[in-house]
Amino acid sequence: MFETGIMLGAIVWLLSGLWFVVSIMRLFRKRWRKSALLHLKLAAGLFVLSLAAVIWCNQFVYLDYGLASREELEQARAERKAAAQAERAAAAARAEAEKAAAAKLKAEREAEQAVLDARKKAEQQAAEAARKAEKEAAELARKCGDTTMAFVMSQEFVTRNLKAPSTAKFPWYTDNQVSVTQKPGCAFRVVAWVDAQNGFGAQIRSRYVVDLKYLAASGEWLLTDIEIR
């Protein structure tokens, strides 16, 4: 009730103050001067009464809260203010906790994504390594099964052991006297013949047996044994 009285008194006080100002302005108009004096008195009286009503209601506003004194009202207001501050502090703490939880969740998701990315990269690297190893194994298998190349390389090693290598003539791979046998460990045995001049300049045919091996690490051919007769 007293709070309502304060509000109504404040409204009347403002309106009466406006009325008072308008009445003063009317004094400067000759034809309104007489009525302006009356209005001025009424506005001044209402202004003073409304102000007094506001002050009086303010002294007893604590009764609206069921309190026994003004001190209890001030205490209640202080408690409400403290409660509001505590609520704001709690809200700020909750917001900070939510922010920290969101940051933690983001960090966990980023860590999970990093693990997934690392796992995916490792799988890709493993798959690439497997493909590379498979390719190398296939290439090695091809090299280890290339009897034609073994036959060609046997000619190279035989030529190095001839007295007149420029005169050497070898048979075709398809010759019935040519034999190329695969051995374990990417090794071969080649049996064939060669026509070449001897130390006296005579062209003679010699049979040869060459054992050679393909080295996958260096991509070279290694002579392990040679016999020319």
Image: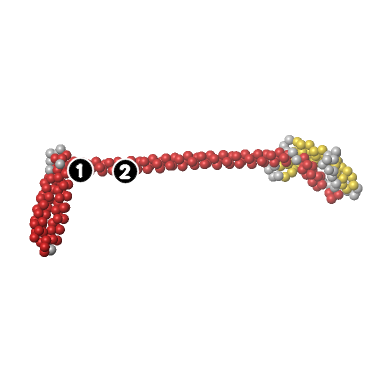
Q: Amino acid at mark 1?
A: Ala
Q: Amino acid at mark 2?
A: Ala
Q: Quadrant of the C terminus?
A: top right
The kind of secondary structure element at disc 1 is helix
Label 2: how many Cα within 10 Å (few below 14, some 14–19, many 20+) = few
Q: Quadrant of the N terminus?
A: top left
Q: Looking at the image, which residue is at 74% across and 38% down?
A: 145
Asked if labels 2 and 1 touch by Cβ distance under 8 angstroms, the answer is no
Q: Nearer the viewer, residue 129 or 68?
A: 68
Q: Nearer the viewer, residue 75 or 36?
A: 36
Q: Looking at the image, which residue is at 14% across and 55% down?
A: 19
Query: Disc number at residue 78?
Result: 1
Q: Quadrant of residue 21?
A: bottom left
Give the percent coordinates (x, y) of residue 221.
Answer: 74, 43
Image side of residue 60 versus residue 193, left or right:
left
Image side of residue 126 versus residue 20, left or right:
right
The kind of secondary structure element at disc 2 is helix
Q: Quadrant of residue 42?
A: bottom left
Q: Which residue is mark 2?
A: 92
Q: Looking at the image, which residue is at 11% across and 48% down?
A: 53
Alpha carbon separation for disc pair 1 and 2: 21 Å
Give the percent coordinates (x, y) of residue 61.
Answer: 14, 43
The structure's colour scheme is secondary structure
Q: Nearer the viewer, residue 44 or 213?
A: 44
